[in-house]
Image (tube, rainbow, N blue to C red):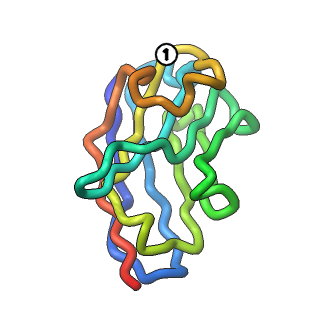
């Protein structure tokens, strides 16, 4: 499967942005999909993930209540709606996919994802 992330940009603190992950592959609907981010000088960190269906979603504590991950399986797409953005949300955002269903203890770790998009830059100014 190939992933393409887009939708990043420059916004002010408190504003919203939606990033988008488009995927190829007929079996994408069975994949667990995650969003990760990496700021300069920092390690890649988990942001959110969704299993096959939208109700099975997971979030980092730092974004819970502000970000929403959702997927549109017929369109092979996963979205990350980001509201009330903060300067500390500034990073390159990557979407990643893992075949099948990741168990809860694995879903937050980048090493369990086999496919990665190229990343999209999100910059939040104060």
Q: Name the residue located 53 percent from the left edge and 33 percent from the top edge.
A: 108
55 relative to 92, above or below: above
Local crowd size for mark 1, using a 10 Å CA cut-off: few (<14), some (14–19), many (≥20): some
Q: What kind of element bears circle 1?
A: loop
Q: Name the residue located 34 percent from the left edge and 59 percent from the top edge.
A: 91
Q: Name the residue located 49 percent from the left edge and 15 percent from the top edge.
A: 99
Give the image location of residue 102, x and y in percent: 58, 19
23 sits to left or right of 75 = left
Residue wearing tag 1: 99
Give the image location of residue 16, x and y in percent: 53, 72
Please state, as top left, top right, bottom left or bottom right, where the N terminus lies in the image: top left
Q: Name the residue located 61 percent from the left edge and 35 percent from the top edge.
A: 50
Toward the viewer: 125 or 41?
A: 41
Q: Quadrant of residue 95?
A: top left
35 relative to 105, above or below: below
Give the image location of residue 45, x and y in percent: 42, 44
118 relative to 67, above or below: above
Q: How many marks?
A: 1
Give the image location of residue 82, x and y in percent: 54, 63
């Amino acid at each position: 499967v190939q992933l393409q992330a887009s939708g990043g940009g420059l916004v002010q603190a408190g504003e919203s942005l939606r990033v988008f992950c488009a995927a190829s592959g007929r079996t994408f609907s069975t994949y667990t999909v995650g969003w990760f981010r990496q700021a300069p000088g920092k390690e890649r960190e988990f942001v959110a993930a969704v299993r096959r269906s939208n109700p099975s979603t997971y979030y980092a504590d730092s974004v819970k209540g502000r970000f929403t991950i959702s997927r549109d399986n017929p369109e092979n797409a996963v979205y990350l709606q980001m509201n009330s953005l903060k300067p500390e949300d500034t990073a390159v955002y990557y979407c990643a996919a893992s075949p099948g269903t990741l168990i809860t203890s694995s879903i937050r770790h980048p090493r369990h994802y086999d496919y990665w998009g190229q990343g999209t830059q999100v910059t939040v100014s104060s």
